[in-house]
Image: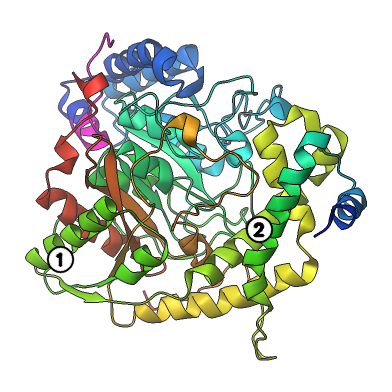
Amino acid sequence: MTSKAPLPTLAEAGRAIASGDLGPVDLTEWALARAEALNPEFFAFIEITAARARERAREAASEIAAGRRRGPLFGVPYGLKDIYDAKGLKTTAHSRLLLDNIAAADAATTERLEAAGMILIGKLATHEFATGGPAWDLPWPPARNPWNRDHFTGGSSSGSGAAVAAGILPLALGSDTGGSIRLPAAYCGIVGLKPTYGRVSRRGVVPLSFSLDTCGPLTRTVEDSALALSALAGYDPQDPGSADELVPDYLRGLKDGIEGLKIGYARAFSEEAGVGAGQRRALDDAAVVFKGLGAEVVEVSLPPLDHLQAVARAISHSESFAIHQKDLRERPQLYARVTRERLMLGAFIGASQYVAAQRWRRLLTAQVDALFAACDALLCAAIAGPAPRLDAVDTNPWRREQPMTAVFNVTGHPALVQPCGFAESGLPLSLQLVGRAFDEATLLRVAYAYEDATPWRERRVPLVYA
Amino acid sequence: MDKREFAALLARAGLRLEADRMAVMREAVDAMQKLLSVLDEPLPYGEEPFSMPRFFPRRPQ
């Protein structure tokens, strides 16, 4: 199926460029060849920006020839979920409504990655406007899971998940309003990081829910996640949600181990959420691994899931309806059916319910935050089990099964999903780690220790890593 | 929510739905409102809404 081997990880690619073993042009051609070969299978890309990528790669090669290397990401390919602006390229949000929407400027995050010398390979599939679900009534098909094409990638950063899992890109940006970075990471067996709300600028990214939207990376390894966050994090006065917090060096201390750290395992939370037996066992096993690494693991209780879910839904539906109401009234036929109906739900939430949700949000956030007085990180499920078949995904306006990811969009804490085993079907299982606000460094350290102690990272998608 | 009430709310919002999706959407709204009803539990007067966007107090670096 493939004409080219999978790309190296972000860290490996950066090192290969630094040592001269690989150049930006070779790496870019490699990524483009793989993207062209695999996109007809997985539909990860909306647009492959080959000409632009080749031009940038040649510029990077000239810089290297002149003795200049900007940093560890210099000359390495990446992709953008197609809600991020890149100057001169279309930002469609996977929607007919934005078919002719050309970005006048880079998103703040695009700007940062370009300044680091990264090479944009293309714009990636998403669920329409980062909501909705897999839809067949749009100009582009839904992305497919590289582990099994008949299965769901998760969403909404579906193309980002597929492209990274398939080894087409070492880094893709996603956005996360209720789990849209972490769910594709979970279903595609990769690492997805939702940073603390305010840590990464959202300027130039199509909004879904102003007070929940968070931008972040999808990568194959935790080290890559740390590398990407180092480039992405930082205060942006032009994003009203951006926080003026010091950005530490995320690579420093990453490999120091977790001896003496305390991890709160929200075991009952998974049970409350109806997590499947195989996924529960994988989480229990992960808790044992953390203990073996010298961490203290204690059971903790999170606030009631129904309250957290109610807050997440009231806020996200209200805010997204506020953004889309004019188009829903005037040209509803341009949306996919599933997007249109899910966005319309916001019309049925009263102002007092929205305010009540924001009052509960404060209370519930304080309750979750209080756990960090005694714990360095929390461990819990992200989803109920492995990726369902694509044709079995609930595309009704009200999704009966809710993931456990939106909880930490409500509270704003940073949360990371990584693989923690495989189901009998061969599809990946996942765990979710949650950190203190603005302490992504400890979160990454815990995730790295787990990744390093387990074999999951080595197991790669058979279809495309053969 | 009965059919008339749902249709009235839909019209008030200025939205239109295909006839064959009315029942599905009405069910969805009912399910959503059932979940949201937990937010009706009274809170003390002093419990203010979340203050966005910078809701975490500055921490010592």
Give the CA distance from mark 1 to mark 2: 43 Å
Callout 2, which amino acid?
Answer: Ala
Chain under numbered label 1: A
The quarter holding residue A60 reads top left
Which residue is labeled 2 in the image?
A: B31
Which residue is labeled 1 in the image?
A: A258
Q: Main secondary structure of the magenta part?
A: loop
Left or right: where does residue B12 sit relative to residue A169?
right
> Residue sitting at 62 percent across and 32 percent down?
A93
The quarter holding residue A173 reads top left
> Residue sitting at 63 percent across and 49 percent down?
A398
Residue A389: horizontal and vertical position, in percent?
42, 32
Which quarter of the rendering shows the N terminus of chain A? Answer: top left
Callout 1, which amino acid?
Answer: Ile
Left or right: where does residue A265 sit relative to residue A103?
left
Q: Which of the two marks, 1 or 2, is nearer to us in this view? A: 2
Left or right: where does residue B10 sit relative to residue A369?
right
The relative height of residue A335 versus residue A29 in the rendered view (above or below) is below
